[in-house]
Amino acid sequence: MSPKRAVSKESNTDLVSAASYFVLALPVIGIAIAFVIFLLSTSSYVRFHALQATILGIAFLVLSTIFGALPLVSGVLLVLLYLVGLVIWVFMLYQAYRGARYALPVIGKLASDNT
């Protein structure tokens, strides 16, 4: 029998931070949820991950719209974008859940400066 992890405020912040990254699974709704988490949270850790997830979601939404509008290469570019998004999504879920304040290049600096 494995020892149970005590539910504490810290473990909840890890879970909420990780949940912010569902922005890539549910683009428009996820962006709104991550932004609401950013606005309502008092933890700078949760606010950082929520804002980083919001910015990341907006960036992927804009890129997928642009790539989708390109006539000849849209399919290939969208598949590559979604694969990159999946890798980033899983990586950031893991980082947030384990308690790391991992900052993505450019986006992480914006999030860090505004939390």
Image (cartoon, rainbow, N blue to C red):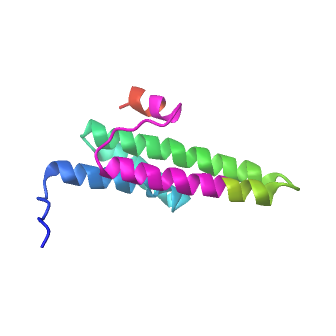
Residue 34 point in image, percent of width and height: 41, 50
- Residue 80 located within the stretch drawn in magenta: no
Q: Residue furthest bottom?
A: 1
The x, y position of residue 36, in whole percent, is 38, 49
Q: How far across and down, in percent of the image, does residue 79 sit?
A: 70, 59
66 above or below 75? above
Q: Which residues are magenta?
A: 81-109
Vertical position of residue 41 compared to residue 24: above or below: above
Q: Residue furthest top?
A: 113
The residue most toward the right is 72
Image quadrant containing the N terminus: bottom left
Depth check: 77 or 113 in front? Answer: 77
Give the answer, above or below, for where 113 lies relative to 98: above
Q: Residue at x 31, y 52 (%)?
A: 97
Q: Residue at x 12, y 65 (%)?
A: 4
Give the residue at the far front of this rendering: 1
Per the picture, the main secondary structure of the magenta-coloured stretch is helix
Q: Is residue 104 above or below residue 92?
A: above
